[in-house]
Amino acid sequence: MLKIENLQAFYGKSHVLHGVELSVEKGEIVSLLGRNGSGRSTTAKAIMGLVDCNGSVRWKGQEIVGKKTFEIAQLGLGYVPESRDIFPSLTVEQNLLLGQKSARKTGRWSFEDMFALFPRLEERRYTSAGVLSGGEQQMLTLCRALMGDPDLIIIDEPTEGLAPKIVELVADYLKELKNRGISVLLIEQKLTIAMAISDRCLGMGHVPRLGPRLPCDSKACTC
C-alpha cells in the first residue's frame, strides 16, 4: 500500500532525511525504531506533506510527494502526531466530529466503536478536551484519527509519558486496528511494545545491538 523510495527531507537548508526506504502492506503493523533525532518523526511528516521533501512516496500506486496535507488525508492516510494537537476548547464529542472525513458518509468507525475502545472517553464525552489528562488526550487523538476512516494510520510515539495501564489500552487499540485490516506505521521507542505487536520492526539511524535477542512475537522482525 505504502512504498517509500529515496526519501529526502529538509528543514530550510538542513538536510534531515537521506534516502529513506520502507514499505507497509495492507493490514500490517510496521514499527519504525531509533533514537531521538534519527528522523522518525520527520519521516511521518514527509509522508503527510508537512515538510519539504523529494524522492518517492507512493500510496496505492499513486505518487503523493508534492500534494497538500489535506489531499493526502483524503486519500486514506491518517496521522497522529506526537504533540496530539487536540482542540482544547471543544468537547470530546466535538473533537471526534471534526475527525470525520465527511458528515454525509458513514465510515467503518462510529462513536460507539471509539467508546468501546476507550470507555473513559464516553464518561468525558461532553467535557472540554483541554482539561483531560495526558492519557485521555492521547486516547482522544487516536480516536479522532480513526473517525476519518483511514486505510493506513501513522502514529508517532503514542505511549510517551503514559501510565502503564494506559499503555496497555493503546496496545489493545493497535491490535484492534490490525484486526480490522488497517495498516499502521508506528513510531515507538519502547521495544517491548513494538516487537510484541508488529509484523516488522525497522531501525532508523544507528540502532545499538541489544545483546541476546529478546523474545519477539513478530512474524518478521528486522530490528
Image: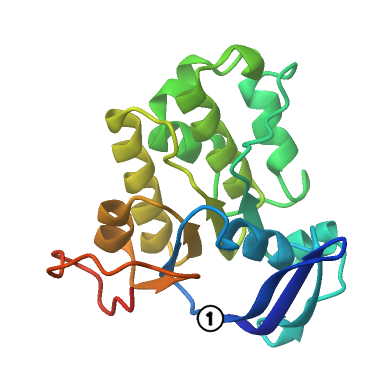
Q: Residue at x 52, y 52 (%)?
A: 36
Q: Quadrant of residue 31?
A: bottom left
Inspect the image, locate mark 1, and give the three-letter code of the amino acid beneath it: Ser
Q: Is residue 42 left or right of residue 161?
A: right
Q: Is residue 59 above or below residue 70?
A: below
Which is nearer the eye, 81 or 207?
A: 207
Q: Which residue is mark 1?
A: 23
Q: Is residue 150 left or right of residue 199?
A: right
Q: Is residue 125 visible?
A: yes
Q: Which quadrant: the N terminus?
A: bottom right
Q: Is residue 28 visible?
A: no
Quadrant for residue 37, please give it. bottom right
What secondary structure is marked by label 1? strand
Q: Residue 137: horizontal and vertical position, in percent?
A: 55, 27
From the image, which quarter does the C terminus lie in?
Answer: bottom left
User: Closer to the camera, 71 or 199?
Assistant: 199
Where 219 falls versus 32 (above or below)? below
Crowding at dot 1, Cα within 10 Å, few <14 / some 14-19 / many 20+, comes out as some
Identify the residue shown where x is 60% and y is 63%. Answer: 39
Asked if 143 appears above or below 79 in the picture, the reply is above
Whole-percent x, y for residue 95 in the image: 68, 30
Q: Residue at x 54, y 80 (%)?
A: 22
Q: Quadrant of residue 66?
A: bottom right
Residue 161: give x, y in percent of width and height.
43, 31
